[in-house]
Image (cartoon, helix red, strand yellow):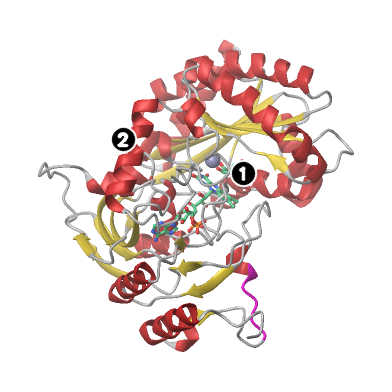
Amino acid sequence: MHMNTPLPSTASLIAQLRQICGAANVLTHDDPGADLSPWEQDWRKRVRGKALAVVRPGSTPEVAAVVKACAAAHTPIVPQGGNTGLVVGGVPDDSGTQIVLSMTRMNAVRAIDPANLTITVEAGCVLQNLQAAAEGAGFLFPLSLGAEGSCTIGGNLGTNAGGTQVVRYGNTRELCLGLEVVTALGEVWNGLTGLRKDNTGYDLRNLMIGSEGTLGIICAATMKLYPLPAAQLTAWAAVPSMQAAVDLLGLAHQRLGPGLTGFEVMNQFALGLVDKHYPQLRVPLWQGTPWCVLLENSDSENEAHARAQFEALLEAALEAGFVSDAVVAENLTQARGLWHIRESITLAQAAEGLNIKHDISIPVSRIPAFVAETDALLAREVPGVRMVDFGHLGDGNLHYNVQAPEGVDGQVFLRENEERVNTLVFDQVLKFDGSISAEHGVGELKVGKLPDYKDPTALAMMRAVKQALDPQNLLNPGRVLTRP
Ligand code: FAD
Ligand code: 2HG
Ligand code: ZN
């Protein structure tokens, strides 16, 4: 038998999958000219896996049949949406024994219910298309993040993504009212109720959300809609310290109330990377200040009201010394430009080289002390290290990213430092009562660390849930929880 010839049981599984989804929707390495790298390589280029096959179902019954066939063949399944995850959670391992279940063909908007303020979409719907469908019907779907042009709502639900509007609208979990899920046994749970109140037992919806493909395959979701704001204004402020940024946040809550829909902080080095790799974006005010803040005010009255409110806030902040300089976008194009700068930090950091990412959360009040103390510890531990600090200060969520010292190769830097840098940062997070993952999830990158930082009773309950719902450990094994 030729070395690459699949075992008979594998060959019959592939044949079965082709029958379920159509031959064109089951890709393998044996197909002439096949290139599975888009599904096998993670976004950060941390890991390159090897799939047994990439399977692209077109409907929920097809997903159920695929899961049943894989369960009978003891073949693990890695669900995947847009493959923009940052913690190596959506790509296969390198064993060549796992299938990637790519959900992108299931991308329909099934229904919009204006009176119920809900939209029901399939899991593979790209977030930007979901936002556009909502807007087309006269509503806002507020989830927003840098990867929105390629991430899917299934992936957003799988990771309980946060993004830039959480301060007002909450995480993906808060935006979801119902799910349609295929279980690890290949059964369909129809939970697309759209109900805002339902106390009939355990909250399975919220268990599935954020489970990173380890408990079930999300096939469709009913999501909340909101009224479109009458006006939206964006400001960019230079602030003298992290404490000043926290003070500005307090003032913004006080003055804008629910109008405060975005509050992002960015350090000088992060903005310097955007300036270096994307000079055409023209980053304002960054050179003369350690931190900048991006604020958004969404108003239900009109633009004049929003502008007056915003200007009064910034004047008060200037007077109090929380802000040293500020610009308010004159129009939508300028506002989009400011947001584009903020959303380009991840890409600019990638262009600079491999790095160590941390998406931590800390009580907002303690962030200034955390940053000062941890910056100093890291500078001592890894001389010359460059901190890319930015993120959703309004939610207490910081992207506390560590870039190699100037001139040091990213690969070498990671090999020599990742473990001790993670331990140092996570120990600090624990000391400051925070979480080691606020939004990207655990995936494979943090799975080894979770037992050191998660409450042991919580971890035991998580293991019991996994065992009960996926007794064969077929769904995304080794992610979130280590293999038993
Ligand atoms: P994938 O990467 O394909 O998968 C992510 C996880 O979800 C995997 O564990 C996968 O198995 C699981 N999954 C995918 N689909 C399903 C499904 N249908 N059913 C069950 N499980 C499923 N995250 C934030 O929280 N906030 C941000 O601001 C943010 N900004 C980003 C900016 C950039 C430039 C990039 C590249 C990423 C960013 N992310 C952010 C990270 C990422 O989590 C999100 O982009 C998104 O939620 C992932 O969606 P996806 O469709 O690409 O999922
Ligand atoms: C963001 O907020 C994302 O832009 C990505 O969560 C953060 O690149 C990162 O570390
Ligand atoms: Zn983020």
Q: Is residue 172 left or right of residue 370?
A: left
Q: Which numbered disc flags the more N-terminal residue, 1 or 2?
A: 1
Q: Does the magenta-highlighted stretch encompass residue 39?
A: no
Snapshot quadrant of residue 314: top right
Please state the quadrant of the image where ligand 2 appears: top right
- Residue 181 pos. (x, y %): 28, 60
* Disc 1 and disc 2 in contact, CB within 8 angstroms: no
Asked whether the viewer can see residue 318, the reply is no
Measured along the vertical axis of the image, is residue 287 above or below residue 246? below
The residue stretch that appears in magenta:
33-37
Snapshot quadrant of residue 241: top right
Residue 116, numbered circle: none
The residue lying toward the viewer, choosing from 450 and 83, is 450
| Extreme-right residue of the structure | 407
| Extreme-left residue of the structure | 200
Dot 2 corresponds to which residue? Answer: 461
Label 1, secondary structure: give it.
Answer: helix
Dot 1 corresponds to which residue? Answer: 338
Residue neighbourhood size for the residue with mark 2, other residues' Cα within 10 Å, grouped as few (<14), some (14–19), many (≥20): few
| Labels in figure, total | 2
- Residue 447 pos. (x, y %): 52, 40
Looking at the rendered image, the disc whose residue lies closer to the viewer, 1 or 2, is 2
**At 78% from the left edge and 35% from the top edge, which residue is drawn?**
416
Quick check: is the Cβ at mark 1 less than 8 Å away from ligand 2? no
| Extreme-front residue of the structure | 1
**At 36% from the left edge and 57% from the top edge, which residue is drawn?**
472
The residue lying toward the viewer, choosing from 21 and 244, is 21
**At 66% from the left edge and 79% from the top edge, which residue is drawn?**
3
Identity, as a three-letter code, of the amino acid under mark 2: Met
